[in-house]
Image (tube, helix red, strand yellow):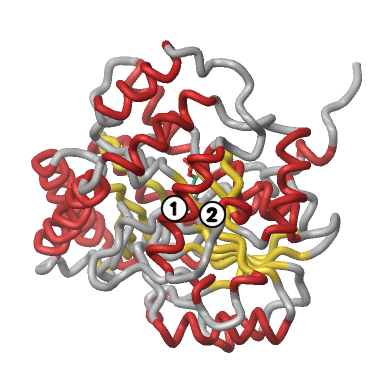
Amino acid sequence: MPNVSNRLRTLNGSGSDGWEILYKSRAMIAAGTPVTELTIGEHDIGTDPAILDAMQTSAANGHTGYATVPGITELRAEVAKRVSDRTGVTTTPDNVLITPGGQSALFSAHMAACNPGDTALYIDPYYATYPGTLRAAGALPHGIQTKPNNAFHPTREDLNAAPDAASLLLNSPNNPTGTVYNQSTWDSIADFVQTRDLWLISDEVYDSQVWDDAHVSPRSLPDMAERTLVIGSMSKSFAMTGSRIGWIIAPEDTIGSLIDLATTTTYGVPGYIQDAALWALQNSSGLEAKIAQPFHRRRDLVLNLLETSNTIRCIPPRGAMYMMLDISSTGLSGADFADRLLEERHIAVMPGESFGQAAAGHIRVALTVSDDKLAAAITELAGFAQEVCEKAT
Ligand code: PLP
């Protein structure tokens, strides 16, 4: 019998894809045990009915055949307008490729940035698919560890210690930490990638979920547009996770090469999904803010609940739909804490270690259940952490 390629068998490095707790909690739910799931970045609301109407109308009107591979002209233009308006960088439809979600865009961007065997840098903690995505594109992933006491920002020293590479991937607002980079972090990142002549791959899928300041896209920094590939998505901003629609913003000639890749891989995105995305971008003003608002409110709720906790520390997140909690005072690893919390209290959270070594001793909580459910789960979680500490002393 032929073997599966080494490339696929080694995609997840050590063998773990980081989602074991999620699979275990899904199995418990299937077996009839109620579990409060604070695991994946899936909203507790569905896609807005008006967007679904636009999708249905488009399909009913016959937009069910092959759509043009780079994306329909109107959507590329609308995305270009959104990016120009939000960042001040002139962006044309020729700078836009429509992709089946941000995940596919991440893979394609690395295919454009890296030759086989090149090192691709990324910031740790990181979104769990990153190392596998970079391997899938033929690159060698190398994580740059950041520190909780620096709010998980990469310092210039952290960056300087990285080996020679072709690209640097980063994500602000960040999953899993909720970190949003400040100007001095951006300045040192821009200087680093220019000095090393790297591509910067900027994953901005949480650009509509920034609490304290405005979102900064590094493509707008001086001399950065020519070396920055921006990953965008409708998943988080418009609660369209299942529709699989996103984009890459890149220099025109790079988009040309990415269209060649799309022709040989995805062959584009369904036309009725693109029409729904176009409708959402053009007509649902205020919806993005409305979708983001509960995560801001729930962040404050959790911060209040944990204010007096002696066992759990938290760096207040400044964006995205997650919180990273430091549970190291319990003496448990993030993985053991998450496993016991699921077994003993039926609450599912992600171990920090699923997102890299920099997040060891932490757990990630997704703010994706109702306020009441979240408050009850956090109270239970804090009680569990306290109990573990007391038993250990
Ligand atoms: N990038 C980050 C940081 C994410 O958290 C996610 C999804 O959770 C993605 C990319 C992929 O999003 P999409 O649904 O657009 O593929």
For the N terminus, which image quadrant? top right
Q: Describe residue 141's horizontal placement relative to residue 157 as left or right.
A: right
Q: Describe residue 92's horizontal placement relative to residue 147 as left or right.
A: right
User: Mark on residue 231?
Assistant: 2
For the C terminus, which image quadrant? bottom left
| Position of 295 relative to 214 (above/below) | above
Residue 68 seen from this side? yes
Residue 339 seen from this side? no
Determine the residue positioned at 53% across, 70% down. 219
Tell me if the residue at label 2 has its CB under 8 Å from ligand 1: yes
- Type of the residue with mark 1: Val
- Type of the residue with mark 2: Ile
Give the x, y percent position of residue 146: 50, 75
Picture quadrant of residue 8 = top right
Element on which disc 1 rests: loop
Element on which disc 2 rests: strand
